[in-house]
Amino acid sequence: MKSYTWGTLLCASVAVAGCAAVPSYQMQQQTHPAQTQPPQTAQRSQTDAADSYIEHLFSDPRLDPIRGKVPLLLRAGAVTPSLLSNEDRPTQEEKRAIKVWESVRERAQQYQLEQRGPPSPQLVRTRQLVTMAIVQLHEGELTYGQFAGRIQQLDTQYRTVRQR
């Protein structure tokens, strides 16, 4: 594996932090006496709006070269058998898309931080490990299938820790 400075990995982890399974945080809401929606409906509406914004970020057409090759936005079932079986390594065009992906993830994570507050220590650690996997994918050290397997493993570990 190539040698990366902690600064590089830290920047990359911030950029890629959205890669780890996004927990279902409760969005903080401000209630006002004149609010017409019940609190649960207002909260659901805020969560839906946040999810819509995140999905909008990931709909960037510059991500199209890697769209069917990596789980751009992790959710339950995001790592599919077809992703796991892909033995290709990124082309130059796909490497450019991976860089865009990092930028989009950075914006998504910043938005999540603003809306939901700081992530748990477990999520921060998972995001760091995902970042390392993305760097390895970009450098051609992992195939897409190996990358998907690593992401699946990290997501499983994160969910196990989170349930405890």
Image (cartoon, rainbow, N blue to C red):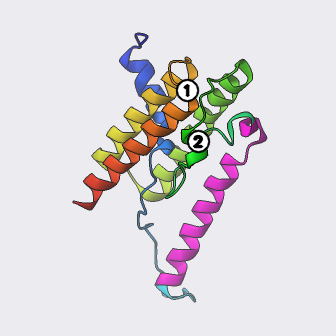
Give neighbour class at mark 2: few <14, some 14-19, many 20+ (Cα, 10 Å): some
> Which mark, by number, is residue 83?
2
Residue at far left of view = 164
Residue 132: % across, % down: 43, 27
Magenta residues (range) = 40-64
In the depicted structure, whether residue 75 falls above or below residue 107? below
- Amino acid type shown at disc 2: Leu
Can residue 119 be seen here? The reply is no
> Which mark, by number, is residue 143?
1
Whether the magenta-drawn stretch holds residue 42 is answered as yes
In the depicted structure, whether residue 55 falls above or below residue 84? below
In the rendered picture of this protein, how many numbered marks are placed on residues?
2
- Amino acid type shown at disc 1: Thr
Q: Quadrant of residue 89?
A: top right
The residue under the point 64% across, 38% down is 69
Between 164 and 60, the one nearer to me in the picture: 164
The residue under the point 46% across, 53% down is 22
Q: Quick one: quadrant of the C terminus? A: bottom left
Residue 8: % across, % down: 45, 19
Residue at mark 2 to residue at mark 1: CA–CA distance: 10 Å
Residue 131: % across, % down: 45, 31
Per the image, label 1 sits on a secondary structure element best described as loop
Between 95 and 46, the one nearer to me in the picture: 95
Whether the magenta-drawn stretch holds residue 15 is answered as no
Per the image, label 2 sits on a secondary structure element best described as helix
